[in-house]
Image (spheres, rainbow, N blue to C red):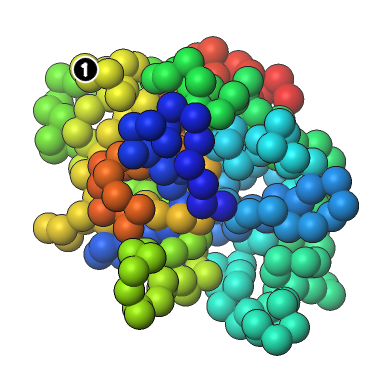
Amino acid sequence: MKRLMGLAALLATTSAFAITGDWIEDTAHPYVGLVVVYDKNGSSMWRCSGSLISPTRLVTSGHCLDTAAGAVSARVYFQQDAGVHFNPSTGVDPVTGWPATCAPGTLGTQCATSVSIHNYGFANFAGFPNTQDAGVVILGQPITMPRYGRLEAGALETVVGKGRKNTLLTVSGYGLTLSVGVHTKLSNVSFRERLMASSSLIDFDRNQWTDGYNLQTQGSGNNRGGTCSGDSGGPVFLGGSNSNLIVAVTSFMRGNAMCRGSDFAYRVDRQEVIDWILSR
């Protein structure tokens, strides 16, 4: 899923999609899945990322589940290398079935289909900065994990007194690792794997882009990683690689189309958002 939307387009902002920079393979968060969204005809529309917070409830971004744009259903793959064996000639990964089906033996263990999809009133990034860019997929097959992502109201506020620059965040998702310009012979790089990287917090409540609704991270250079196309909806964990505390979901980027700008994520550690997520 890579598109410009409403106000975001005017502000040189793109919805965010895969892990860039200094990344490693993510085997620490098996509950982070590759989300494929389908239209009413069952044709795949785009891919995103998301996190299970229970066996059947997956949290992602609202723009990934944009029903106004035609999103009707979703399938989620939990293999770390969900699309790495993708065969362009057949259009399917023979090991996982991505993006068309769940491979034999994986339904209910490493793959699940949606019963319903919901977004938190997302409307093409309207109402900025409160874009309501949160979403929930309710799965038809429970996925059993040793642990799941967790939500905690006000988690980001706890870091204010500890120094924002020293606040460690971890991003995870599937998608592009290198996005190149349109006027080049180089190709985008996509490993179709779950990757993760460390990021540092810039702001979550002091500028027009955040204002308490979004968090802004630094995602390039100096042992940091950022997000790109395919990471939308993926978790931003408060803490290091073993953390399961999700404070936001990857939302948008300011800068250029090559995933080298500032990263922003919609906060899901606000009580009203948590209440909505748990009510689905």
* Residue 214 percent coordinates (x, y): 37, 26
* Residue 11 percent coordinates (x, y): 34, 32
Q: Is residue 268 visible?
A: no
Name the kind of residue labelled 1 in the image.
Arg
> Mark 1: few, some, or many residues within 10 Å (few <14, many ≥20)?
few
Q: Residue at x 73, y 41 (%)?
A: 71
Q: Residue at x 67, y 61 (%)?
A: 77
> Would residue 238 appear left or right of 38 to someone viewing this image?
left
Q: Residue furthest top?
A: 272
Q: Which residue is mark 1?
A: 206
Q: Is label 1 in a helix, a strand or a loop?
A: loop
Quadrant containing the C terminus in the rendered view: top right
Asked where in the image residue 207 lies, by quadrant, the reply is: top left
Q: Is residue 225 above or below residue 86?
A: above
Nearest the camera: 236 or 190? Answer: 190
Q: Residue at x 21, y 44 (%)?
A: 218
> Would residue 236 appear left or right of 126 to someone viewing this image?
left
